[in-house]
Amino acid sequence: MRKTTAMLLAGGVGSRLNVLAKLRAKPAVPFGGIYRIIDFTLSNVMNSRLDHVGILTQYKPFSLMEHIGTGAPWDLVGRKRGAKILPPKTGEKDFDWYQGTADAIAQNLDFIYRDVPENVLVLSGDHIYYMDYRSLINFHEQADADITIAVREVPIETAHHFGIAIADEKNRILAWEEKPKQPKSNLASMGIYVFNTSFLIRALEKRQGPDFGKNIIPDSIQINKVMAYRFKGYWQDVGTLQSLWDANMDILDPDSELQLSRWKCRTNIEEEGMVGDRPPSYIGTSARVKNAIIAPYCTIDGEVYHSILSPGVKVCKGAVVRDSVIMHDCVIEEGAQLDHVITDKEVQIGANCRIGIGDVICPNQQFPDHLASGLTVIGKKCVIPPGTTIGKNCIINPLTSANQLGTHFLACGTTV
Amino acid sequence: MKKILAMILAGGRVDELKALTQNRPKSTVPYGGMYRIIDFPLSNLMHSGIEKVGVLSQYHSASLVRHIGIGSSWDMVGRDRGAMVLPPFKSEKKSDWYRGTADAVYQNIDFIDEFNPDLVLVLSGDHVYHMNYQELIDYHLRKQADVTAVFKETPIQSAHRFGIATIDREDDKTGGRITAYHEKPVNPKSAWASLTIYLFNTDLLKKMLAELIQNSESFEFGHDILPRMVKSYRAYGYKFYGYWAYSRTIQEYWQANMDLLSDHSPIDLKQWNVRTNLDHRNLRDRTPTIIADSAEIHNSVIYTGCVIKGQVSDSVIFPGTIIEEGAKVTQSIIMFDTIIKKNSVIEKSILDTDVIINENCAIGRIDGENDRIDKDDDDEITVIGQATIIPSGSVIGRNRIIERTMKPDQFNHDTIISGKQ
């Protein structure tokens, strides 16, 4: 394998994650109890023994910068190793925000020039998967390709969400369709590209638009060698609330391919509020815990079924948490019931609340595209007063106080 | 602000801890689901703002050296900060193992001189407690003491196991002048037991150590230094009222762990903010714990990296423990990366790290006729040493010690059932 620099696009807004991405970039959204989404890509970089990664941030980068730190959790510190955060720079024009994926790389060519790599690997920080990038890069080199795109087969009815490759039997891409209404193939782009560095630099110079998927790739197919690398393992784009919940629940499924320990996934546990300073969990005498992920410093006296508990979560006596993802330092008071709920960090659920209870009557009224499957999502640091009932498909915005909620009953589909 | 150096006596091996200290000093015996006992004094130092520490060690130091690292886990890295393990060494004139606690400090006078502190705080590496040493230092300075030692009231019937001081009523609840001190007295006249925490004025400490090395055959702070100082110097006792666990025996060590298991545990690990070295045993890289549908867990402490499919109650479970379906663990301490296979029963036992208990074993169970234990021994605890592999179907009764790294072919089945290994 020749020298390769990785560029990780971590600026995603993640608007379909709604309240979870209001205060942080999508790659920084917590996942699986102790992780953030970007940990999966960073761990893949580490496990593929790549030495240099540039991380391109833009939207609400603070959580992300704090999380990545020096890159030490992913063994990216050393004489010839490094993880560098690359924020947008003030250019000659007023403020040159990244206009798209290709534009973001073009603005950071300095970082690539410094290492003089033969290949540039472009990654996204939005997906849950395990891949050894070395086999992708080896495939790219053996095919003597200009671009290689990692693709996977998806059900044809979902293909319109993705960039779609039409490839011949030797996996050469003959045509490319970006989010086509009537897809001609089910080979979906994973947002992972390998470029020959010299080709990439030329392509960026004469680019007709800011995106890889919309511009560079379609424009290159005719003249250049663009290959498809077929990936077969677990891969989940956790860009929607439902897919985020699904992927969390896959951790609990012994038959799922999502195997955290086999994937050697690492995170930064020293980060503020994370597990470094936290003692073990205590499971009390009256507790019942079945089919759950338990992070450090949980105190459980109630019942927890088929759920993910992040560090510092407290489930009091008589409380029942079912099919839910509970993020850091939430407190579920006595007698409260949660069913199919995602709570962001530091949420307080008062005694005898009933959250996510009842039938699915309608999608969320304000965001029907984001929430229709019956989940209820509560934003960071919300305080839900005792005795409140909140139905399905509800969204509570971050920092909502007991007073702001103003009612003890929220019907299915409400947003506060 | 006085310049303070802490010296932690961490090298001791205690015979009573048997298999647990076969290849590590008492101070690095795992505790509380993720810690080592020495994390308690180190975290206390960090919270007390004492950032320069020498750790004296001579028994199987590797585990200690690995655990302390550069001291960064306790924020002891910086220009005037540091934690350093000080093993015995050879020098031009003399070379010797540490002959006692006082000798260990004496042999490292150079280390003290280099930092040149006003006060030296001598601690033990093997007690579980939370203390702000600054309060002790304030008291010491206020009393213009030469030495101040810390004491806790103990039941009079166990006082003979400790150094016992008679403390006058000078400051009532806070402390007072020590009027008499006896190491492990046969007939104790007071219930104030030494926690082996000593704060010395550096100059006097050096003088006392030099005199002791000249004139004595025994070199212990408790036995030798403190009684001498009570006579001719200002020796003060500072009274401590918090939780303090002394894990000198298997029973005490087990109890100190069991003390964590309650809604109202006297050990508030979060409030104490105990830190450990997360690189030791790769704590940093472990997944969260997975609790399966078949699991039942009650009144237990558990950290990351475990997979629990069986039943667990009243137990302390360290990272990497795997408890398979049908296995049952009660009143036990299961250390790092130990595997308990299907349908094995573990009662009132301590399983050291990397143990494998194969299927259908019964460990630590009182087993009627097969068991020769006297009634008095009912309470006692079975210990399985590090990296031992117990063959399937084994029955190991209560109060047994299995030494570390025993492999299946080394077991004589009969002896396990009825005798001590």
Image: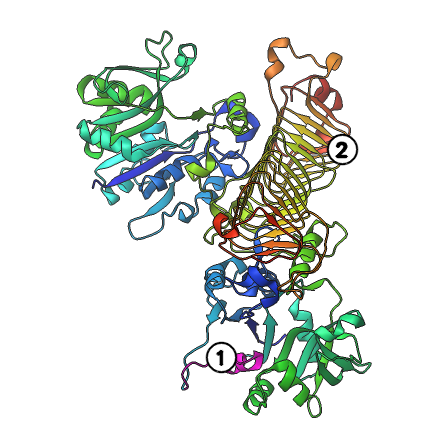
Q: What sort of colour scheme is used for the picture?
A: rainbow
- The disc label shown at residue A108, or none: 1
> Label 1 is placed on what type of residue?
Asn
Q: Provide the major secondary structure of the magenta segment.
A: loop
Give the image location of residue A366, x and y in percent.
62, 64
State whether residue B90 appears in this view. no
Is A106 contained in the magenta span?
A: yes
Q: Is residue A390 magenta?
A: no
Residue A165 in which image quadrant? bottom right
Determine whether the residue tagged by mark 1 lies in a helix, strand or loop.
loop
Residue that carries the numbered disc 2 in the rendered image: B326
Q: Residue at x 49, y 72 (%)?
A: A58
Q: Does B220 sit above or below residue A171?
A: above
Give the quarter of the image for residue A202: bottom right
Disc 1 is attached to a residue of which chain? A
Q: Quadrant of the C terminus of chain A?
A: bottom right
Secondary structure, mark 2, is loop
Residues A252 and A109: in front is A252
Q: Residue at x 73, y 13 (%)?
A: B368
Q: What stretch of residues is rendered in magenta?
A: A93-108
